[in-house]
Image (cartoon, grey):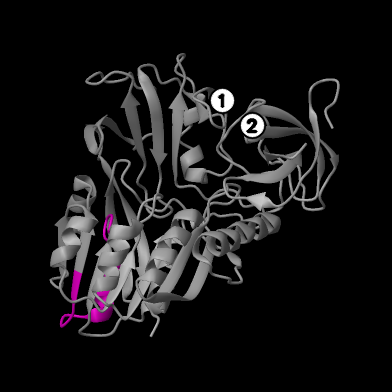
Amino acid sequence: MTTSEGLLELVVGPVAHGGHCVARHEGRVVFVRHALPGERVLAEVTEGGSRDRFWRADAVAVLTPSPDRVVPPCPFAGPGRCGGCDWQHAAPAAQRRLKADVVAEQLRRLAGIDVDVEVEAVPGPGVDAGTGLGWRTRVQLAVDDGGRAGFRRHRSHDVQVVDDCLIATDGVRALGLTHRRWPGAVAVEGVVPATGDDRLVVLTPSRPGRRPRLPDLPEGTSVAVATAPGTTERVRGRTWVTEQVGLPTGPRSFRVTGSGFWQVHPGAAAVLVEAVHEALRPRPGEHALDLYAGAGLFAAALAGAVGPDGAVLAVEGDARAVADARRNLHDLPQVVVRQGRVDARLGGAGRADVVVLDPPRTGARRQVVEAVAALRPRAVAYVACDPAALARDLAYFGSAGYRLAGLRALDLFPHTHHVECVAHLVPAT
């Protein structure tokens, strides 16, 4: 049904990957944001025309609400506003069920794997488990032409100016990035680890070679400028922060430069190490691979498990991350860090008893999966931030003689559609 105002009256169906649900209008699929399964809503079409196979729409009025619906805690969540969060209108437990349904559906459809999925809530310093707020230790904001900070609207380059971000940690919010002007910048990122006193602001200038003007910042805040992809220039203080993680062998510090990759949830690093260790159970004297190694988190944990008689090869393509990893792992002689594309470096890997794969959102892809399987490790731990990419790669592993032996799904990104998975793979025979 279409109302006189041009809105669609829809009965909302199941959740789909990407932060929306599926509905149908006169036989056409409509992907609806800001809705929940089972609801009856009025939706405004945001993308699509008469010749398109599907439309995108926002639920602008809820006629029959789901019992899982709540009032979004953030005033900037909702149709046409901030695109950073997808599920603020759902209770946290319901969000986890929705994410579990997405993971299970992607595995079933793309990999032919039927598995029960439960998404675990993850505790962490300062995280409010009841509300799912206060977890993001790194926040990157876009800057509009007036120098005001905010977030991109969904599927748009337009900036929604905000005065706060409730999913950020108290430390990040205390930087006051949304209350300051950033002339000459197109982006500003705040980084405040959950432990320690480090605070870093990274600016991306609107023009290469031009340094943005700095507003006043809290005392002790370091400032850097991203002068090029992977390159950070010091303005004051340090260009890096220290992240502290409790490993099976004890606490360890990791240096992470600028906007370099590190899990943003305060509890993420520890629970991922736990999940990987649980899957691989590395033994003294074994040889391990850490692929897409970043700053060296998993390599450090593997080194402690395989001991001085074992060996760990860490492979990472980003030069800045490699520099951090070499510094972070310099006291572990059993670890070798190599820079380069994973597919190019795997050819000389030699023996591999256990393997960690932690690829970017696009996944490892067929060539890397087949190269890993050709090494015949006894166990693989695949850390994935995108369930569709994970499912595709698990299908490749299946064709290469490996099967899924276990899966943990972790809610490291409450209120968004993102979910982290750790898949445990073993030889099929």
Residue 78 left/right relative to 204? right
Kind of element beneath mark 1 = strand
* Residue lying at 56% horizontally and 48% vertically, measured from the top left: 134
Q: Which numbered disc covers residue 160?
A: 1
Occupied quadrant, residue 244:
bottom left
**Type of amino acid at the residue the image marks with label 2:** Phe
Q: Are marks 1 and 2 in contact (CB under 8 Å)?
A: yes
Query: Where is residue 188 drawn, in percent x and y?
Result: 40, 30
Q: Which numbered disc covers residue 76?
A: 2
Which residues lie in the magenta part? 293-312
Q: Quadrant of the C terminus?
A: bottom left
Kind of element beneath mark 2 = loop
Nearer to the camera, 248 or 422: 422
Residue 111 left/right relative to 362? right
**Type of amino acid at the residue the image marks with label 1:** Gln
Q: Residue 308 in magenta?
A: yes
Q: Residue 135 in magenta?
A: no
Q: Is residue 15 above or below residue 172?
A: below
* Residue lying at 68% horizontally and 46% vertically, measured from the top left: 21
Query: Where is residue 418 drawn, in percent x and y?
Result: 53, 51
Q: Is residue 369 above or below residue 133?
A: below
Residue 223 left/right relative to 1? left
